[in-house]
Amino acid sequence: MSIDRLFRLSEHGTTVRTELLAGATTFLTMSYIVFVNPEILSTTGMDAGAVFVATCLAAALGSLIMAFAANFPVGMAPGMGLNAFFAFTVVGTAGLPWQQALAAVFISGLVFLLLSLTGVRAWLVAGIPASLRAAIVAGIGLFLAIIALQKSQVIVGNPDTLVALGTLHSHEPLLALGGFLLIAVLEARGVRGAILIGILVVTAFAGLLGYVDYQGIVAAPPSLAPTWLQLDLPGLLHRDDGTPVAVLLQVVLVFVLVEVFDATGTLYGVAGRAGLLKLADGQKRFGRALLADSGAIIAGSLLGTSSTTAYAESASGVQVGGRTGLTALVVALLFLVALLFSPLAAMVPGYATAPALLYVAGLMLRELVDVDWSDLTESVPAALCALAMPFTYSIANGLAFGFIAYAALKLGTGRWREAHPAVWLVAGLFILRYALA
């Protein structure tokens, strides 16, 4: 079978050349994850080299599933925000070993798959108000921002004010802020792969200044053994350290909620921009795409990484003409090629990935324009949701505060009928979590 027939290129008004270009464009805009994800997850004690391999393999596998199952031009990889929740909330705050955190990702993938098969996923997405959906994205952005500012030492701890401005005479904050400005300028000028360029330029400057030891560029991939099949499902389900069941349920609930909103919203946006939802089989293929991303989450947890999701950066490939799964196939192949660049990934310091986190955070904040600021029953819960994430250092707390406040305000103003049953369900689960904690 020819590539044209396999991916129905002629039917979609595209060519092999266009799809190859779209795939390369999408890869360049999302490839920063191979540097950022190991940096974040290694804070939990996970082997950075193994996480690098798991990240590349999970991205390649997820994109392959998307290419052949749904024929969508969507790249997949471990999600930003979800990796931060995994590292800094589930492991850092809740105290779960990373092996049990991987088990929670696995369970969330199974739940995600079940929700997709039964149609509950669509019910949940339709039931959550637009203001809270926007606040969740913006809040995760703020959470990423505070992580970035900490990693680069732009902000430091202070016993009197909690946080304070760091010493700007040291190389970490100066290089990080310079990298952030470089990324923003390149993005504004329409340069593809601006985030990746920013990371590499900061790393190169750090090396020239003697702060990074050169380890080479290309080498055989590190061993995946330290993370492969290391998820501890029995340990998660039978914890004997006094961790309340409600806390474990909250971990899975937050993974599922963020996965639902993140992946579904991205798929709708990218597929809609490509005009794929208007096709005769558009909705059927969209359903397959939903199953693809839930399957990729399960596979990623087995490989040893946090939740895999559809990437909004796929819109860059659509912009240059990508319309089919051939675009996603190119993304998958390029992530496999990226496996050879593990020495480069090992050299990238935290303050080189911080500019990427900070820039992505800024992009996520623009979601706040979708909040109805004229309605206090919508805007107050949204603001509380977004603000609680960075200030409690927990995506879970932000979600809880937002949903509970939304339900309470709608009930208190006599407008309880405006809240979808999904809101009451999620708010009730979070109240139960705090009651049993």
Image: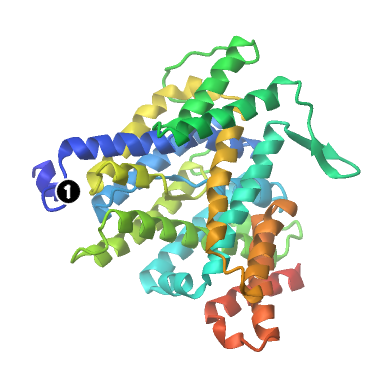
Q: Position of residue 92 (x, y in %)?
A: 70, 46
Task: Identify which amino acid the numbered label 1 is placed on.
Answer: Phe
Q: In this view, does 384 lie to the left or right of 371?
A: right
Q: Which of 322 and 294 is in front in this view?
A: 322
Q: Quadrant of the C terminus?
A: bottom right
Indicate the secondary structure of the residue bearing disc 1: helix
Q: Can residue 381 be seen in this view?
A: yes
Vertical placement of 123 versus 16: above or below?
below
Q: What residue is shown with label 1?
A: 7
Q: Where is residue 21 in the image (x, y as percent from the top left)?
A: 26, 35
Q: In this view, does 407 lie to the left or right of 287?
A: right
Vertical placement of 119 versus 289: above or below?
below
Q: Which of 340 and 16 is in front in this view?
A: 16
Q: Position of residue 17 (x, y in %)?
A: 18, 35
Residue 36 is drawn in which quadrant? Answer: top right
- Count of number-bearing discs: 1
Residue drawn at point x = 70 percent, y = 85 percent: 412
Q: In this view, does 317 lie to the left or right of 407?
A: left
Residue drawn at point x = 28 percent, y = 53 percent: 274
Q: Where is residue 354 in the image (x, y as percent from the top left)?
A: 61, 34
Vertical placement of 263 versus 418: above or below?
above
Q: Quadrant of the N terminus?
A: top left
Residue drawn at point x = 41 percent, y = 20 percent: 220
Furthest residue in direction right, as rendered: 160
| Colour option used | rainbow
Q: Is residue 53 visible?
A: no
Residue drawn at point x = 69 percent, y = 57 percent: 387
Q: Which of 359 and 122 is in front in this view?
A: 359
